[in-house]
């Protein structure tokens, strides 16, 4: 994590630093244990095939958590995640390379809070989208900081 | 009536009925294992020394940590109503009101809020939307979560 980002520093269309992931069977097992999501199609290939998937698939909530990692890293310790909405568009198979990306869609001030809306998504190596999401965060403003120091 | 429609009818009967509240303690080791499973090294989730100097003054949980409380278990019960079908997570919507901190006791209340039946490429599918409310030991609202699952 780098230094704190401020509301004034960002502009609509800015990209968020990308996050590359490659979920392994080990990671899926760790996730199952930590999240309580024990559905067998996430660690038993026979069951995944029986349910109609070409192999073991990655938990949707794990991918959502990757996007949450991306946005919380970007907003920094003084940022607040207010809302996140994810939509799983296409499943991801275990050991697939995926890239988590984001960009600033909107920024506005409401009741002295500095809001930023970001589009987030997970794509594969070919740039095909697997998960789409929207996140709303508040960021510190440099103006507010000046008020404090005065 | 086909098999899927009769299952859908069973689900429709459950709409809006709140499950008994469940209580869940936020534990430091659990948060650490959760962050490690994501591969998320943010010190706010793991480093007491760092977190102690922030405005939170202690370790807080990553955003999706709350799914272990209330949501997963409630969904498992719905899944058991038609165990032969694949359960696909359609998407999640969470509004966050307060951080979840180590030592908090979270009360969750879950309900099924929406049921839809659609016909897809691979046959009939049921869309279930579950809503969970999370509050802490002070009675303050911590988060609200809506999750849609597809049974096909």
Image: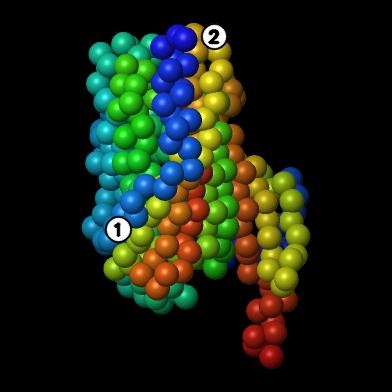
- In this rendering, the answer to whether A143 lies above or below B38 is below
Residue drawn at point x = 52 percent, y = 63 percent:
B97
Please, what secondary structure does the residue beneath circle 1 have?
strand
Q: Position of residue A112 (x, y in %)?
A: 72, 72
Residue B121 got which mark?
A: 2
Residue drawn at point x = 69 percent, y = 82 percent:
A146
Toward the viewer: B108 or A81? B108
Q: Position of residue B99 (x, y in %)?
A: 45, 64
Residue drawn at point x = 26 percent, y = 54 percent:
B30
- In this rendering, the answer to whether A15 lies above or below A43 is below
Toward the viewer: B96 or A90? B96
The C terminus of chain A: image quadrant: bottom right
Q: Position of residue B3 (x, y in %)?
A: 41, 12
Residue drawn at point x = 50 percent, y = 27 percent:
B127
Please, what secondary structure does the residue beneath circle 2 have?
loop
Label 1, on which residue? B23
Same chain for labels 2 and 1? Say yes or no.
Answer: yes
- In this rendering, the answer to whether B70 lies above or below B2 is below
Q: Earlier in the sequence, mark 2 or mark 1?
A: 1
The answer to which quarter of the image holds residue B48 is bottom left
* Classed neighbour count for the residue bearing mark 2: other residues with Cα under 10 Å, few (<14), some (14–19), many (≥20): few
Task: Tell me how far mark 2 sits from mark 1, CA to CA.
Answer: 40 Å
Toward the viewer: A79 or B99? B99
Toward the viewer: B67 or A3? B67
The answer to which quarter of the image holds residue A85 is top right
């Amino acid at each position: 994590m780098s230094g704190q980002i401020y509301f004034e520093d960002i502009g609509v269309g800015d990209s968020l630093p990308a996050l590359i992931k490659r979920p392994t069977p080990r990671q899926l097992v760790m996730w199952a244990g930590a999240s309580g999501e024990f559905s067998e199609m996430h660690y038993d290939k026979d069951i995944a095939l029986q349910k109609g998937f070409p192999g073991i698939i990655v938990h949707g909530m794990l991918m959502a958590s990757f996007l949450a990692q991306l946005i919380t890293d970007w907003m920094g310790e003084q940022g607040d995640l207010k809302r996140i909405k994810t939509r799983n568009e296409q499943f991801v198979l275990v050991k697939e390379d995926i890239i988590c990306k984001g960009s600033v869609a909107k920024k506005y001030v409401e009741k002295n809070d500095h809001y930023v809306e970001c589009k987030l998504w997970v794509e594969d190596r070919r740039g095909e989208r697997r998960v789409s999401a929207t996140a709303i965060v508040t960021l510190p403003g440099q103006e507010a900081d000046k008020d404090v120091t005065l | 009536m086909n098999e899927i429609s009769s299952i859908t009818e069973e689900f429709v009967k459950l709409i809006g009925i709140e499950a008994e509240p469940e209580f869940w303690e936020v534990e430091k080791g659990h948060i650490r294992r959760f962050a490690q499973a994501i591969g998320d090294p943010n010190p706010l989730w793991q480093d007491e020394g760092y977190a102690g100097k922030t405005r939170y003054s202690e370790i807080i949980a990553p955003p999706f940590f709350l799914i272990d409380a209330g949501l997963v278990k409630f969904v498992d019960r719905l899944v058991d109503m038609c165990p032969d079908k694949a359960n696909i997570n359609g998407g999640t919507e969470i509004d966050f009101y307060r951080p979840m901190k180590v030592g908090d006791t979270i009360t969750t209340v879950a309900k099924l809020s929406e049921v839809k039946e659609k016909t897809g490429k691979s046959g009939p599918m049921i869309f279930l939307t579950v809503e969970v409310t999370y509050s802490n030991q002070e009675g303050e609202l911590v988060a609200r979560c809506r999750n849609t699952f597809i049974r096909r």
